[in-house]
Amino acid sequence: MPIKLKSIKAEAEACRKAWKGLEVGTDSVHNHHEVLTEKLTSSATDRINYILTDKPLPEQALRLRLFRPVTRQAWAKYQKVTRQAWAKYQKVTGPAWAKYQKVTGPAWAKYQKVTGPALAEYQKVTGQARAEYQKVTGQARAEYQKVTRQAWAKYQKVTGPALAEYQKVTGPARAEYQKVTGPARAEYQKVTRQAHNIICKEKNCPWDGKTIFV
Ligand SMILES: [Zn+2]
């Protein structure tokens, strides 16, 4: 069900009322449209006034409706739920990432063994050409470009197969990592989206995990 908003004036009034007597440092929900929760760094009154003066008119009522304080109790509960979900997610990604690195590590070392000297060679050749180019003008520009083009072609010829080899190893390893961690990530995102309801009391809040403007 879409959210039913009142006038900007009425929403501002309700927002002020909700924040009455609360200080800087209070946990808030939907202070900024892409951040679910944050501590107030200036007074709520300042923020409300800012919304009224600096935010586009069509956004104001929604912003004022959703910008609310979070009670300590709700905050603690929210943290507990999201921390548990994060720990659970990490339990899956940790070993998967270690495995990914174990598989791709040697391939990366091998790749670097080829590209390191090739890059040094490229820089040596183009560095000399560049120094020459800066010393003189005119004809030197064409010569400089020719030398760097050749050096780059040589670099690519040397490192191209090494990169292909490296990608041959990392491609499947990455796919495997994503396959293993994908469901865990989806679960983590699901839990954190639901945890939104712990700190946001707006029943029809449009927050989608990224923004309130959907
Ligand atoms: Zn919300």
Image (cartoon, grey):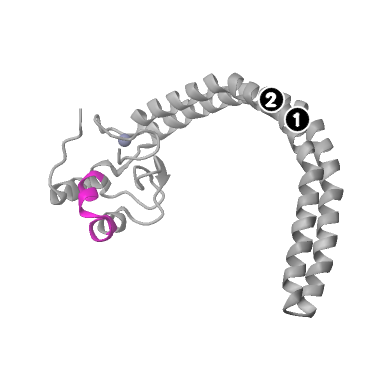
- Relative placement, left or right, of 195 versus 151 is left
Measure the C-alpha gap from mark 1 to mark 2. Answer: 7 Å
Of callouts 1 and 2, the N-terminal one: 1
Amino acid type for the residue under numbered disc 2 = Ala
**Front one among 151 and 164:** 151
- The foreground one among 8 and 149 is 149
If the image is split into quadrants, where does the C terminus sit?
Answer: top left
Crowding around mark 2 (Cα neighbors within 10 Å: few <14, some 14 to 19, many 20+) is many
For mark 2, what is the residue? 173
Image coords of residue 205 (percent x, y): 27, 33
Q: Is residue 10 visible?
A: yes
Question: Residue at horizontal 24%, vertical 29%?
Answer: 203
Q: Position of residue 122 (x, y in %)?
A: 81, 56
Residue nearest the observer in this picture, 37 or 55 = 55
**Which element carries disc 1, helix, strand or loop?**
helix
Residue 17, percent from left and from top: 21, 47
Q: State yes or no: residue 56 in magenta.
A: yes
Q: Which mark is residue 104?
A: 1
Q: How many marks?
A: 2
Residue nearest the viewer, comparing 67 with 110:
110
Disc 1 vs disc 2: Cβ atoms closer than 8 Å? yes
Determine if the magenta segment contains residue 60.
yes
Quadrant for residue 115, please give it: top right
Q: Quadrant of residue 65?
A: top left
Q: Which mark is residue 204?
A: none
Q: Main secondary structure of the magenta part?
A: helix
What is the secondary structure assignment of the residue under circle 2?
helix
Q: Which quadrant of the render holds ligand 1? A: top left
* Residue 120 higher or lower than 72, as above or below: below
Work out whether residue 91 can be spotted: no
Q: Which residues are magenta?
A: 50-62
